[in-house]
Amino acid sequence: MNSRTERPRRPRPAGRTVPRTGVLLVGALALGAGLLAPSVAGAAPKPGPKPAPEAPGAGDLDLSLIGRYDSGVYGESAAEITAWDPDTERLFVVSAVAGTVDVLDLSDPTDPRKVGELDTPGANSVAVHDGLIAVAREASPKTAPGTVAFFRASDLRPIREVTVGALPDALTFTPDGKRVVVANEGEPDSYCADGVDPEGTISVITIPNGTRTTTLNGVRVATADFRAWNGREDELRAAGVRILGPGASAARDLEPEYVAVSEDSKTAWVTLQENNAIAVVHLPSARVTDVVPLGLKDHSLPGNGLDASDRDNAINITGWPVMGMYQPDSIAAFTAPDAGGKPGRGGKPGKAGKGEEFLVIANEGDARDWGCYAEEVRVNALILSPEVFPNAAELRNNANLGRLTVSVESPRDEQGRATELHVFGGRSVSVLDSEGRMVWDSGDHLERLTAELFPEDFNANNSANGSFDSRSDNKGPEPEGVVVGTVNDTPYAFVGLERIGGVVVYDLTDPRAPRPAGYVNSRDFSGDAETGTAGDLGPEGLAFIPAGESPNGRPLLVVAHEVSGTTAVYEIS
């Protein structure tokens, strides 16, 4: 187990076909030594154990691009979140620009074809379970209560809508199919005097058995909120939870982003991205039982480096005196293998022996930028404390840290000089135990991997080719989506890199020491993004299809790309 620092006690509540080609890169660049456990502000993190030596190719996966559906819409979020229904062999893809969920026939995964759509203005997320489709829809304005619309998967007939919280951003069915859990982000429209900042909440929708795909009569909606922490904002801050909205209470400032659910369907873990924390929800009672801070990542330590400048015209992944806020977007749950059973989560749902449950998070990072408040600031706009940063002038050079985007809320001394620099996102993937404690982080592996494989396109943007190093100053590769799937009894995490593109794979057999297992990137760096010749850009939502549910009998990974508007199908072997 990785060593980790003691955290402060936290308060608890009183269509076209493509050939089988594409960039295929497997098992490249092993994780280096010194992967780190989390650090709480003011505490020195300690390096974790070295990963076990790798047998070349052992456990690696091959991901081959075998099919692609192209919406023909570039740069408008025409393909975001995906959900798979094995009974109809259809894939459901959120198209934000059209206000629909596109229905793709995936019976031939080499030739995905659009066969229908669900009229769902404001759609943000979609999930399917046992013949029932659920779509999360934000209202207009977004600060008003949203809805979840239900459809029958067999004929796409609308069944019922229910009201949930403001800005439902993600939803999922529990493994037993009895509930739908919705993360209502509750973003403000501004922080000005006349602005509206709704509460962030989690809706727990109970699905009746007898009317599941007919009328849904008897459906119930319960709300888990954060009001128990109102008046205790200072306690949350002291524990490491970011509460920073001007004048906001805890209930309004905490913003649920994404949801994972335990194998027994009783617990949900919800990312609070801007707050750099995880909420734990007891689903039977629809009650938030804990808010867990994720701490800070010390980028000055070996194995935790980052490339901090977009103006040095070089790849320079090294240690810098900055602290990373993990700020995960997506989260997935899985059960680790043990002698008593096989892994669950991502393959066919079921028991997994007596294995321990863990969480995987993709540490994207996100800043708040609303009317009357902007959180992002560059280091060269700050005055640095000479006691903490004796080489401040050198650090503020644009080729060093000057261009790095940090939080304006970074700690300062009484004279207003920065004493720490807090950057958005961990540029990494982490594993947490079931209580939200971090047991592993990938350190700087993602940047080192992409630097080795794509040195001419390192930290490129997702909207244009020829953009080398353009994201180094702001979150780097940006791991965003994550899903866990089981292949040959081995659990793997599949992680989408929003900026440079592609999917990185980690073998989760040992959750405290995952190992790289592959990387595929079907972006064409020689093509033109706007004319549709650059392949797949901006991976957003991922769906794993286990072999037992797959239309061709082989495990598949489906990835929606919001910038290119494409949905790619990869075969896993």
Image (tube, rainbow, N blue to C red):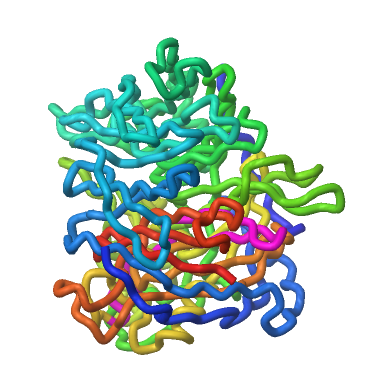
Is residue 478 on the magenta stretch? yes
Query: Residue 181 placed where, x, y %?
Result: 47, 30
Query: Residue 366 placed where, x, y %?
Result: 35, 52
Q: Residue furthest right?
A: 339
Asked if residue 5 shows in the view, the reply is: yes
Is residue 461 on the magenta stretch? no
| Tally of marks | 0
The quadrant of the rendering that contains the N terminus is bottom right
- Between residue 44 and residue 56, name the one nearer to us: 56
- Judge from the rendering whether residue 262 lies leftward or rightward of residue 213; answer left or right: right
- Between residue 415 and residue 450, name the one nearer to us: 450
Query: Residue 550 placed where, x, y %?
Result: 53, 56
**Among the 4 quarters of the image, the one containing residue 383:** bottom left
Query: Residue 356 placed where, x, y %?
Result: 75, 45
**Among the 4 quarters of the image, the one containing residue 20:** bottom left
- Between residue 209 and residue 503, name the one nearer to us: 209
Q: Residue furthest top?
A: 218
Answer above or below: position of 557 versus 244.
Answer: below
Q: Residue at x 38, y 75 (%)?
A: 522
Numbered range of the magenta stretch: 468-494
Q: Residue at x 19, y 73 (%)?
A: 532
**Among the 4 quarters of the image, the one containing residue 187:** top left
Q: Residue at x 54, y 25 (%)?
A: 178
